[in-house]
Image (cartoon, rainbow, N blue to C red):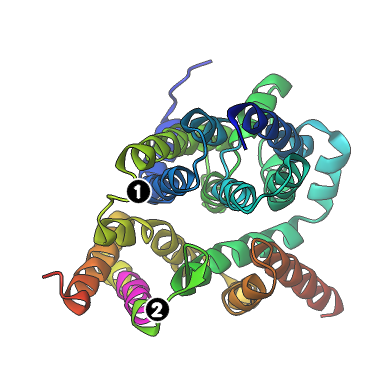
Amino acid sequence: MRWLTADTRSGWRAGFAVGPTFLAIFAGFGIASQATQVPELAAVLATLLVFAAPAQFAMVDLASQGGTLAQVIAIGVLVNLRFVLMSLTLATRFQGVSRWRLAFWAQFVSASSYLLTFFQSRRPEPGNLHDYYRGVVLVTFPAALLGTLGGLALGVGLPDIVAFGGTLFLPIYFALLLASEVRGRYEIGAVLIGLLLTPPLEALAPGWGLFIAAIAAGGLLRSIEGWA
Amino acid sequence: MGLNEWLIALAGVFAGSYALRAAPFLWAGFRRVGERNLHFLTYTSFAIAAGIVSKALLVSAGAWVGWQDFAIRSVAVVFSVLMLRSWRNVPVALFAGVGFAVLLKALVGGSL
């Protein structure tokens, strides 16, 4: 089996589009860790082992407010519940991959590796989707690690304008993918529900809004589709 | 929390998160559920992508952004989509959108 296939390189190229956002977000995590006196080793291990910025921020935030060990573990796992949905979607698209490879690469499921692979799966010739997914991970995971290290090194010295630009790569890239990929009224409906429902739900239930809005969109549209 | 407590916390979150990430790949029952609900998963995927976009327009570092930042981010997204329509090239549209947003922010914030 070849390690670097054409599909892996294709995923790699897609990963580079979102890499700057990973750098910026995880630099923010490094800065937040330093500001709240999280040991540097723990901050780096958080990115290595958890690899999920929302959960990492939630853990650091709760720990800084005096949360207990059990509470910090619980919040980290609960914020990551969305991974079930993402892995479920990917599992239906990864065919003929050994259990060991699936078990290893499962650790790197993130919103980006999942969504980029999902969009790739809709192309007329998607290629080997697990290779593509690996390519995305080979960029995003090192970017997350570099960002964390950079954030720890920079402290609060990251220029605001750089941080601002860095956070825009991911949303603009997803907006471009949506603009070119959405087909049919149900998919447009899903996009509109996600766009409109996520921010207010995030305000009501921080960390959960995205997940709840997505489940609501899927459930509602599936029901309408069933009635039609 | 000290380093030892952090190590225990991270081990716990790693174990829990890994179980959530890996179970659908490794447990056939989960996979069958996924195969039976492909449309549902497709719609949720689009909603998640759209939610990431709208969240990034309105929220930054856990707080609502000001109207000026919201306007800059929204204009940048629209600009990059228009660039995609004219250039048919995603990286060009992406960098044009981000560059445009940074330029607007610098102009509005007086950094230029």
Residue under numbered circle 1: A20
Magenta-highlighted residues: B71-81
Q: Residue at x 37, y 72 (%)?
A: B77
Residue under numbered circle 2: B70
**Pointer 1 chain:** A
3D distance between C-alphas at marks 1 and 2? 20 Å
Residue neighbourhood size for the residue with mark 2, other residues' Cα within 10 Å, grouped as few (<14), some (14–19), many (≥20) = some
For the residues beneath circles 1 and 2, the answer to whether they share a chain is no
Q: Which secondary structure lies at badge 2?
A: helix
Residue A152, x across and y down, in percent: 38, 39
Mark 1: amino acid: Pro
**Pointer 2 chain:** B
In the image shown, does B73 or B110 lie closer to the viewer?
B110
Mark 2: amino acid: Phe
Residue A197, x across and y down, in percent: 64, 77
Q: Residue at x 58, y 47 (%)?
A: A60
Where residue B15 sits, quadrant-wise, is top right
Residue furthest toward the bottom?
B67
